[in-house]
Amino acid sequence: MSTYILQLKEKIQPLQGQLLNHPINTYLNSFDDLKKFMQIHSFAVWDFMSLVKKLQIEFTCVSLPWKPVGNPQTRRLINEIVFGEESDVDQHGHPLSHFELYVSAMRNLDIPVLPELNQLLKTNSIGELIELIPDLNLDDRVKNFLIFTFESIQNKAIHEIAAIFTFGREDLIPAMFTKIVTQLKNDSSKSINELIYYLDRHIEVDGESHSHLAYEMMEELCGFDEKKWLEAQDAAIESLKNRLNLWDAIIEA
């Protein structure tokens, strides 16, 4: 791991620490708590895929005729993550995206998807999404979380988007979800097994090769450019602050 990565991780460690020790890790004590958590967290499950797809567009060939694009290792990382997110398998071995798996877990618990998420799923462009979000009947912190993701996809440089992906999502999710799973496993009901399976899949995949490959992607994108590393750091910090605000919104709900 390069000095640049270590320095960036040191800078964001206080925010990551706040997330890992957030009260949400001890709040899921009733069905109503779990319902609110899943309904709001589903927005973060969904928007993550657009973040991944943006990286796929930048680092792999998604046009015709095909030609090799970029660094093969980065290409493999992105394609692996897209494959895992978009075409994983459920507990019974049936192909399913992680978003669909999450929605299935909600359905298994009789938790409806919020109509605001269904509205977003019907949009056809990033611009349309960004215009729609402020009018949704959601907590401002949830809306700001989504706006940050999609405005970043639309406007930020690719090394900043990669930093949001790497340090705001991939690097954080295994430890964050482990705490939530530990809490949920105190519930012996079978209906919660599908949610635990979803969380365990992220802990397993993100905690193994993906984080290491994402660091390599950052090193390739930023190289020895101090300005790029500072921009990546700022994007990561902003991403983590938005996640903290999202968690706060869930607690209040």
Image (tube, helix red, strand yellow):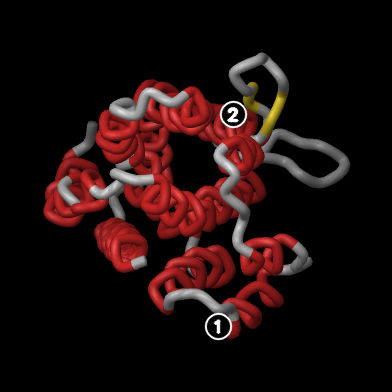
Q: Can residue 89 be seen in this snapshot?
A: yes
Q: Which residue is mark 2?
A: 84
| Label drawn at residue 69 | none
Whether residue 8 is visible:
no
Give x and y (percent) for residue 15. Answer: 18, 56
**Label 1 SS:** helix
99 left or right of 23? right
**Image point (47%, 31%), residue name:** 192
Q: In the image, residue 82 lies at what x, y percent?
A: 61, 36
- Residue 202 image point, x, y percent: 44, 30
Which image quarter holds the C terminus? bottom left
Report helix, strand or loop for mark 2. helix
Q: Viewed as shown, does residue 200 lie left or right of 39?
A: left
**Residue type marked 2:** Gly
Residue under the image location 41 percent in, 59 percent down: 160
Looking at the image, residue 3 lies above or below residue 54: above
Query: Residue 102 vs residue 66: left or right?
Result: left
> In 3D space, how far apart are the residues under numbered discs 2 and 1 (Cα atoms)?
31 Å
Q: Which residue appears at 47% of the width and 50% of the height?
A: 38
Please give the residue where the numbered disc 1 appears in the rendered image: 134
Q: Is residue 9 left or right of residue 34?
A: left
Label 2 or label 1, whichever comes before in sequence order? 2
Assign the N terminus to one quadrant of the image: top left
Q: Classify 10 Å Cα crowding around label 2: few (below 14), some (14-19), many (20 and above).
A: some
- Image coordinates for residue 142, horizontal then vertical, percent: 44, 69
Residue flagged by tag 1: what amino acid is it? Answer: Pro
